[in-house]
Image (cartoon, rainbow, N blue to C red):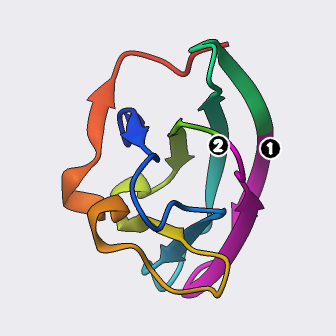
Amino acid sequence: MALTTGIITNTGSPNATNLVINIGNDNLSFSSNVVYHIYVWNALVSKALIYSNSLNINANTSQILSFNITGNTSYEVQFLVTGTVPTDTVINVFGTDSSGNVIPPQNVLQQELTQIAQLNP
């Protein structure tokens, strides 16, 4: 099941300089695999893939990832979660300012992610 945050506008004050992704696998027995793609839009409104990776999340563990998105007017994160029980993997995305403070309008919690047919290339 592929998921997306949708395009998040990053032009307010303050704007996000970093993107934080919290991934937790709440299953007690099975690991999951998470593929993520991070896209940004600059002032020219051209979409660019800036980060892409696949990682294994062991049972009952979590990972917190942080990425620099300074200077981009918008961003989007897409995920593909696979495994025995992919629905036990919970993903939340936060935009943070240069001091590490969460920017509330740029929070996308698990229940707010939108299902898509596939990850964009």
Q: Secondary structure of the magenta portion, mostly?
A: strand
Q: CA distance from mark 2 to mark 1?
A: 6 Å
Q: Does the residue at mark 2 contact the one at mark 1 (Cβ under 8 Å)? A: yes
Q: Quadrant of residue 105?
A: bottom left
- Who's the residue at 34% across and 65% down the image? 107
Is 67 inside the magenta-drawn segment?
Answer: yes
Mark 2 burial class by Cα count in 10 Å: few <14, some 14-19, many 20+: many
Residue, x 40% and y 73% (percent of image)?
103
Residue type of the residue flagged with mark 2 = Tyr
Which quadrant of the figure contains the C terminus? top right
Residue 108 can be seen in this image: no
Q: Which residue is mark 1?
A: 53
User: Which quadrant of the rendered structure holds the N terminus?
Assistant: top left
Q: In front: 47, or 97?
A: 97
Percent position (x, y) of residue 25? 50, 75
The reply to whether the magenta stretch includes residue 77 is no
In the image, residue 34 sits, relative to residue 63, either above or below, namely: above
**Image x and y of residue 81, in percent:** 52, 46
Say which residue label 2 marks: 36
- Report the front residue among 21 and 60: 21
Visible residue check, residue 110: yes
Q: Which residues are magenta?
A: 52-71
78 to the left or right of 8 = right
**Residue 108: where, in percent of width, then height?**
32, 59
> Left or right: where does residue 64 sit relative to residue 75?
right
**Element type at marker 2?**
strand
Location of residue 30 in the rendering, given as x and y in whole percent from the top left corner = 56, 70
Mark 1: give few (<14), some (14-19) or many (20+) Cα within 10 Å. few
> Which residue occupies the extreme left position in the image?
111
Q: Amino acid at mark 1?
A: Asn
